[in-house]
Image: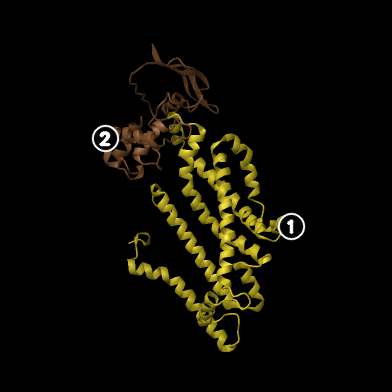
Chain colours: A brown, B yellow
Amino acid sequence: MSFVTVTDVWQSYGGRSIIERVNLDVAEGAFVSIVGASGCGKSTFLRLLLADETPSRGEIRIDGGPPAREPGRERGVVFQRYSVFPHMTVRDNVVAAESFATGLGRFFGGRLRAARERADATLARIGLAHVAAQYPATLSGACSSASPSARR
Amino acid sequence: MRMINRRPARPVAILLAALPFVAVLVAYAIASDIRLAANPADKLLPAPATIGTTALRLFTEGDRRSGEILLWSDTWASLRRLGLGVAIAAVLALATGVPIGMLPYARRAFSGFVAVLSMVPPLALLPILFIVFGLGETSKVVLIVVGIAPFLIRDIAQRTLDIPHEEIVKAQTLGASSAVIALRVVIPQILPRLIAAIRLSLGAAWLFLIAAEAVAADSGLGYRIFLVRRYLAMDVILTYVIWITLLAFLIDGALRALSRRAFPWLGAGL
């Protein structure tokens, strides 16, 4: 039973066709690499998977659900750049993974304390505990690559 | 070594920074001296010493009629109008600019309108404002708002659009609604940009304030300058002009310090 089904997906911008007739079935837990020459449509395909764009033709389904029209919780992404929120500390970035789904986007009181403790535990597990209270701009390259993954 | 790679040592750097100011002061002193040597009663370029004594008098002595020190009451009246006008314009910029930047519906509805609004010359509206709002505080504050709000709105809208799309997508994958994206992603990053835009608008805000006070007021720094111009009291005028410049400089510095303190994540900036 495939988890991600890509059926006959075409994408074009203006008159230019970028990807045509893409079909893909990925089982749950599988690890897929997409390789290709520069400009062959890898980023376009990832944007379609993310539901950041809609394909001109065809559909993409996750877990048999309807094709998505916007990114949501069932999709996760770590971007090459701008993958953390620069105005929040590393710890708050990790807490945001849980708090953004609430009505106001934040936790208060006891819930906030518990979320912060969970975030600190995650950061300790991946070795970023020493920068938990710093802002992303001040991190070294290695640290700033690790932090968006911590949020996932 | 190329000119672009040469850096002055610290003492030289300080000297260079002070040089233009010193040059202006020296030029003024010389010009004033020449005029006063020809005509001691000359009122156009008072001697620096005269300006100094006048300034001291204005800052410390009360008005003969009312007893209050006019310069301080003028300062307070002007700063009150300026503060109110800038605050209202800032709130408008946030309330209009962020939706224009975030929501395609709002952008279509308002961005053209705001663009046209920003082309209306505010000083030409001044008589209309006086007719509609009277000659009191309201018309002056409204002029400041009308003068700087369109620029602030357009700047905030553009800054909102400049927030990397990746951050917005990231927030959506974490389950954020439009409101949460506005509250937790957009507005916290926009606020320091708002302060920067306000700092850039303060020059225009002072302009509109002084223009409004010059035309119809009974207190304020602009009012006082245009009042004493009839007596050619250049020493008073220059004192007030230098005082306004100093106030603007201090306010700009205070806003920059506020931005650095409140938003430490921003890093280097103007």
* Numbered circle sitting on residue B131: 1
Q: Is residue A97 above or below residue B246?
A: above
Q: Would residue B227 appear left or right of B250 to someone viewing this image?
A: right
Q: Is residue A61 above or below residue A47?
A: above
Q: Is residue B228 above or below residue A77?
A: below
Q: Position of residue A94 (x, y in %)?
A: 36, 34
Count residues near mark 2 (Cα–Cα under 10 Å), then give few for <14, some for 14-19, many for 20+: some
Helix, strand or loop at mark 2: helix
Q: Are marks 1 and 2 in contact (CB under 8 Å)?
A: no
Helix, strand or loop at mark 1: helix
Is residue B167 or residue B220 the one in the foreground? B220
Q: Would residue B40 appear left or right of A142 to someone viewing this image?
A: right
* Numbered circle sitting on residue A124: 2
Q: Is residue B270 visible?
A: no
Q: Position of residue A31 (x, y in %)?
A: 33, 21
At x 48% / y 39%, what residue is drawn?
A: B183
Q: Chain of mark 1?
A: B
* Numbered circle sitting on residue B212: none
Q: Is residue B233 visible?
A: yes
Q: Position of residue B244 (x, y in %)?
A: 54, 67
CA separation in Å, label 1 and label 2: 67 Å
Which of the 4 image quadrants contains residue A144?
A: top left
Pick the quarter of the image with the C terminus of chain B. bottom left
